[in-house]
Image: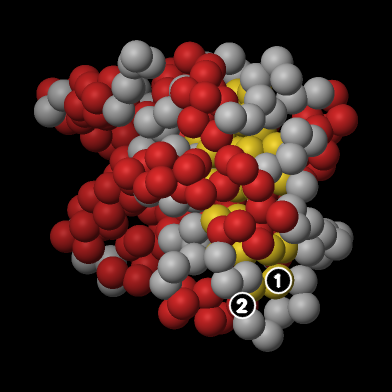
Amino acid sequence: MIGIIGIGHIGETLLDGLLSLNDFDKQFSIYDVNKETIKKYEHLKKVKIYENNEQVVRNSEIIFLCVKPSQFEELALELKQHMRGEQLIVSVAPDFSLASLQQMFSHQKVMRMMPSTMMLVKRGVIAVSKTVDVDETLTEKFQLLMQGMGYLFWTDERGINQTIGVAGSGIAFAYQLIEAMGQGAIYNGLTAEDAYKMAAETLIGAGEMLLKTNEHPAKLRDNVCTPGGLTIQGVTKLAELGFSHAVIEAVKATYQKEE
């Protein structure tokens, strides 16, 4: 049984993404203080809605903690006496180190996961770090659980926060770029529906092209820029307005150094 405590934005995305995997036969135990957020799961045979967090812990092998960071200490006090040594805790909060989670929950088998809302469409970029106490068997179970959700990036703990600006917050930056490209296209005469769809498809295609060719993005950009053409004029305007600098600074701003 897979437990998810907290069915907010990330918890819901995680659960919905896992439920959408056609070849997935796992059962889920869930709890959220807001009963309205979990009503939509009441009819699903794969999902068991419990009355409290303790019941989720008692009936789960892997437990995802998807509550707000401010709730972690209270949650730990509630749960640590009910945890079993073989269980795996997976935290999605960026605020707590592996060591602090071990101490907080009095539990050794802990992972930190930096999730991506794109898990919902099986294109998530998911950074994961674990304690040395998480054995190969648990690691493999977690890997099999998450592999259908996108790209799983194993890293040391420092790498968790280093990925936020690209894999986590970067999604928001991408949406801003799609909106801006769409608005420019609307200004040039396209309908809003066509403009935003074209912008989104362009970003998808650009990403797939880079992954397929393994070329440096600058080379792929230059391949599109005909000398004296319209694209290089647009690229030059971006440079004049500090586009690259703005994106770099935005990604840097998301980095939270470990205490």
From the viewer's side, name the closer residue of 249 and 153. 153
From the viewer's side, name the closer residue of 164 and 224. 164
Horizontal relation, residue 40 to residue 256: left or right = right
From the viewer's side, name the closer residue of 161 and 191. 161
Extreme left residue here? 241
Is residue 98 depicted above or below 40 in this figure? above
- Tell me, yes or no, if residue 244 can be seen here: no
- Tell me, yes or no, if residue 71 can be seen here: yes
Amino acid type for the residue under numbered disc 2: Tyr
Residue that appears at 63% across and 82% down: 42
Screen quadrant of the N terminus: bottom right
Tag 1, which secondary structure? strand
Identify the image quadrant of residue 226: top left
Identify the image quadrant of residue 89: top right
Horizontal relation, residue 21 to residue 158: left or right = right
Task: Verify CB contact (< 8 Å) between mark 1 and mark 2.
Answer: yes
- Label whose residue precedes the other's in the sequence (1 or 2): 2
Say which residue label 1 marks: 47
From the viewer's side, name the closer residue of 256 and 182. 256
Extreme bottom residue here? 43
Is residue 229 depicted above or below 49 in this figure? above
Say which residue label 2 marks: 41
Identify the image quadrant of residue 52: bottom right
Disc 1 residue crowd, few under 14, some 14–19, many 20+, Cα 10 Å: some
